[in-house]
Image (cartoon, rainbow, N blue to C red):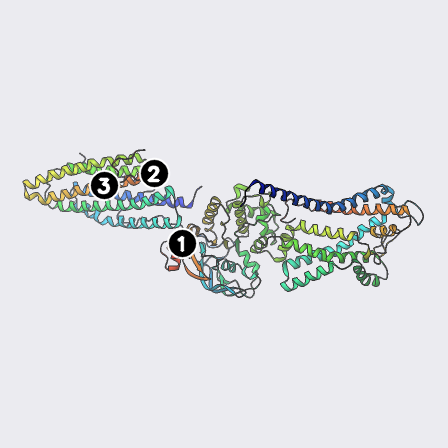
Amino acid sequence: MNTSSRYHAWRKIKNLTMSGVSFACAIVVIAPLGLVLFYLIAAGAGAIDWHFLTQLPKPVGETGGGMANAIVGTLALLGLASLIGVPVGVLGGVYLSEYSGERMNWWIRFGADVLNGVPSIVWGIVAYTLVVVPLKGFSAYAGGAALGFMMIPLIIRTTEEVLLLVPNGYREAALALGIPRWRINLQIVMKTALRGIVTGVLLAGARIAGETAPLLFTAFGNRFWTHHLKDPIAALPLQIFTYAISPYDDWHRQAWAGALVLILMIFLINIGVRALTRGRFSGATR
Amino acid sequence: MNASVAVTQPRREGAALKTKDSQSLPLTRLATPGGKETTPRGTPVSEVAFEVDNLSCWFGQHQAVQDLSLQIPARAVTAIIGPSGCGKSTFLRSLNRMHELVRGSRLSGQIRLFGENIYGPRIDPTLIRRRVGMVFQKSNPFPTMSIRENVTVGLRLNGVRNRVALEERMERALRMAALWEEVKDHLDRPGTSLSGGQQQRLCIARALAVQPDVLLMDEPASALDPIATTKIEELIQELKKDYTIVIVTHNMQQAARCSDYTAFFYMGRLIECDKTDKVFTNPSNKQTEDYVSGRFG
Amino acid sequence: MERHFDQELADLKENLLRMAAFTEQSLAQALKALVQRDDALAKKVDADDAVLDKLEIEIDDRCVKLLALRQPTATDLRFITMAMRLSGELERIGDQAVNIAHRAEELNREPLLKPLVDIPRMADHAQGMIHNSLDAFVYAKPNLAREVIKRDEKVDLLNRQLHRELTSFMIEDPHTITRCLNLMSVAHNLERIADHATNIAEDIVYLYEGRDIRHQNELMTP
């Protein structure tokens, strides 16, 4: 091995160069994110005020108004979607990780991965067929269903991955105590992986919160407050879309504000859920 | 000049003399199995805890245990020794029906626990596992639970709700595992905050809390330092007064120190099973002799 | 930390001491049989020796098992190996006591040759040496053991003295030959007993200091 100082210097230079290149790549990746966020704040922050957050949209042509119904609508749709997506997704993930056999596993995973790649508008069509047609109208239920169906494959995969990370030793120890299988999965394995599962759910929630296409003909949008869930409901992405393609500057401004509000909302939900599920002792995973 | 030579007096504590009429001066014996009529769970104790008849275990095509027959005496420590891959862990796991949890596993033969066939058609494996507890090589206290919750998990998750009963069982289990004094002031700390040796004793307490009849130990001290190992070995000597213990170990000296009976396995077969002092001073089988003298391989 | 092994070692020590007490008693009775010309006592000593033999076997067996099962080190190891040697020495002392008893029975067939002077003196020494070496064992006093080793000389001296005296007896009067030979035999037995006590003392020094002082000319005092 050549231990001369020249060789050493050359190795140092190589090291520094590669570190620099990695750093530059990281910047290249993060920079657009930062720029988008910055632009969003710059463009939208100005338009957010109390009116924006509490008033309904004004009729065409009038300035002012807000997106209160859209904000509430998005929250409602998220809630409905979670009701469908979270139980099915999490329990499906538990089944994949704890119960099913080799062949089944492969098929379910394959199916979930395929579904993850399906264009979101297709989910809208599915929900249209399953909910809008029988109910003979657009509704919050339909929107929630569309978004919920989208969440399922996402949550199944993330839950399964996180559960697989739980060391087998815990399952064995619990089995050796004579605890029934379902209890082990619920109160030991899932509890250990809870933070990871929550992360997965939040990720799925963040993904669907911004979806517009599936809501186009399921939730449909609403200029006024929705009083029954079987009526059409407003949602931030829909409202942003409508405003953004309009010719009015005021509406453009409000569209930016709406986008910012959407991002802030997701951010707050994230923090809130994490704070609530912060256990005394962190589990084994993420 | 002293014409009469005095008979010397007995020297000191306990050295009381017997006269020529009692030909045998009883020597204090090493502890032998014996004791109460029932196990802590209330199962009446016969001399034999496990009767194994022609047991064979497979993992898919590979046969790990071949036609093994053995008796494991109650209220004693039986050690199972042998080189790696000889089937000792597989055998141990067949005693509490954990072998069948492995995909592709198969088993034939009969195992009777205090007379009852544990693989009978209507037997619930979960109930067997409550009667036959297990401690693993790597200590695994549940990370999301405190020390208190860890010890009582076997009771709570099987439906026991009574707070007072749980506290009492927890204290008893921790005392039996020689851990009470060290943790009694911080029972609410996480189970994983203890040292390696303490964690293993916590796992033992957890297993004891459900009051099994038998305690299986799969190389319980192999991941521990010498002092922690000695504590576990001393603990085993105490526990055998109430529990039947089967310990698998690759450390022969540990088997020599801890156990009353030793079984030597090789390539899935039982080569010899006898009292430990015989196996280590004068084994009947040449293979056994080679193994315990370290001449194997 | 209290170990179960400690209890086993304590039991072994207790058994050794029991054997020692029995040995001392056996010797004392043999000497009493000699001095008081008591045949019955002599026969008793002979019969009781079986107990000592049995004890030696049991203690040795226990020691082997402890070595195999407990892998002792340091003091524990020296103690167990010394215990095996000690049981052997004690058993041989017992055998010598039986020999003395036999000689006593022989001597009782004929009238007393002369008042016993040197033999009781030798007996005193021998018994004292056994007693002190066992004390050194129990109270962990290796220097006391060294005293015992020094005392062996006196016993050897007395033996030689008695030898000369009895030889002159025999030359003077051939009718005393049987009795003199028996008495010389007793003296020889006592001298052997003192040697055994010396061996025990050397073992005690090894136990407590880890130094083997056998066959040395000096006592290697620390």
Farthest residue in the right direction? A61
Residue B4 location, quadrant? top left
Relative to C186, residue A217 above or below: below
Label 1 and label 3: CA atoms lie apart by 40 Å
Kind of residue at badge 1: Gly
Kind of residue at badge 3: Asp
Mark linked to residue C195: 3
Q: Is residue C149 shown left or right of residue A156?
A: left
Q: Nearer the viewer, residue B158 or B104?
A: B104
Q: Name the residue at 23% across, 35% down.
A: C151
Q: Name the residue at 81% across, 43% down.
A: A41
Q: Is residue B94 shown left or right of residue A226?
A: left
Q: Mark 3: which secondary structure?
A: helix
Q: Which residue is mark 1?
A: B294
Q: Position of residue C32 (x, y in %)?
A: 19, 41
Q: Position of residue B244 (x, y in %)?
A: 47, 54
Q: Nearer the viewer, residue C185 or B279?
A: B279
Q: Which residue is mark 2?
A: C208
